[in-house]
Image: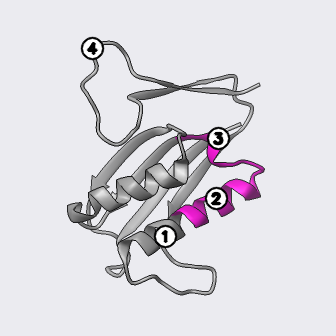
């Protein structure tokens, strides 16, 4: 049985945003690598605001996890790409709400994103 355990070693620097410094995965039988999930809905629409786009990305992540018989509980690593650092706080709030206590390893990168209308993109790794 796969076990996913968040870890933060003694002597680690403090973090903001409810995430561990590492995640240990024991005995996985399957790995799922999610391509960057974009803020586009199945009907092709795009929310105008950051929170709407971020929620859509998380909906898309859950769709891909479900296709593999997984849930957010299976997430091991999440990498978030923000188009501007001004979205950092909203991103944290949406992530904490959507993950509801789950703690995958986390990286947030501020960078240009493929489509200028996209404010956020998230890729992830899951294990089962």
Q: Does dot 4 land on a helix, a strand or a loop?
A: loop
* Cα–Cα span, label 2 and label 4: 34 Å
| 1 or 4: tag closer to the N-terminus | 4
Mark toward the viewer: 1 or 2: 2
Q: How far apart are marks 4 and 3 (CA)?
A: 27 Å
**Residues tagged 3 and 2 counted as in contact (Cβ below 8 A):** no
Q: Mark 1 points at which residue?
A: 38
Q: Which residue corresponds to mark 4?
A: 11
Mark toward the start of the polypeptide (3 vs 1): 1
**Is the residue under label 4 in contact with that under label 1 (CB below 8 Å)?**
no
Q: How far apart are marks 1 and 2 (CA)?
A: 12 Å
Q: Quadrant of residue 118?
A: bottom left
Residue drawn 35% across the image and 81% down it: 117
Q: Which residue is drawn at 70% across and 22% down?
A: 27
N-term mark: 1 or 2? 1
Quadrant occupied by the N terminus: top right
Alpha carbon of mark 3 to alpha carbon of mark 2: how far?
A: 11 Å
Question: Which label sits on residue 62?
Answer: 2
Say left or right for 62 vs 30.
left
The residue closer to the viewer here, 116 or 47, is: 47
Q: In front of the other: label 3 or label 1?
A: 3
Which stretch is magenta? 58-76
The quarter of the image holding the C terminus is top right
Magenta stretch contains residue 2: no
Q: Position of residue 9 (x, y in %)?
A: 37, 16
Mark 2 and mark 4 in contact? Answer it, CB < 8 Å.
no
**Viewer-proximal residue among 24 and 51:** 51
Please tell me how crowded label 3 is: few (under 14), some (14-19), or many (20+) other residues with Cα within 10 Å: many
């Amino acid at each position: 049985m796969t076990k996913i355990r968040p870890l933060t070693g003694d002597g680690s620097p403090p973090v903001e945003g409810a995430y561990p410094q590492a995640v240990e995965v024991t005995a996985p039988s399957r790995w799922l690598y999610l391509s960057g999930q974009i803020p586009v809905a199945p009907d092709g629409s795009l929310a105008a605001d950051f929170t709407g786009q971020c929620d859509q990305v998380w909906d898309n992540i859950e769709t891909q996890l479900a296709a593999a018989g997984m849930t957010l509980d299976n997430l091991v690593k999440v990498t978030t790409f923000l188009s501007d650092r001004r979205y950092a706080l909203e991103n944290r709030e949406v992530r904490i709400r959507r993950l509801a206590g789950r703690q995958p390893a986390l990286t947030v990168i501020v960078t240009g994103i493929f489509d200028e209308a996209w404010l956020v993109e998230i890729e992830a790794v899951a294990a089962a």
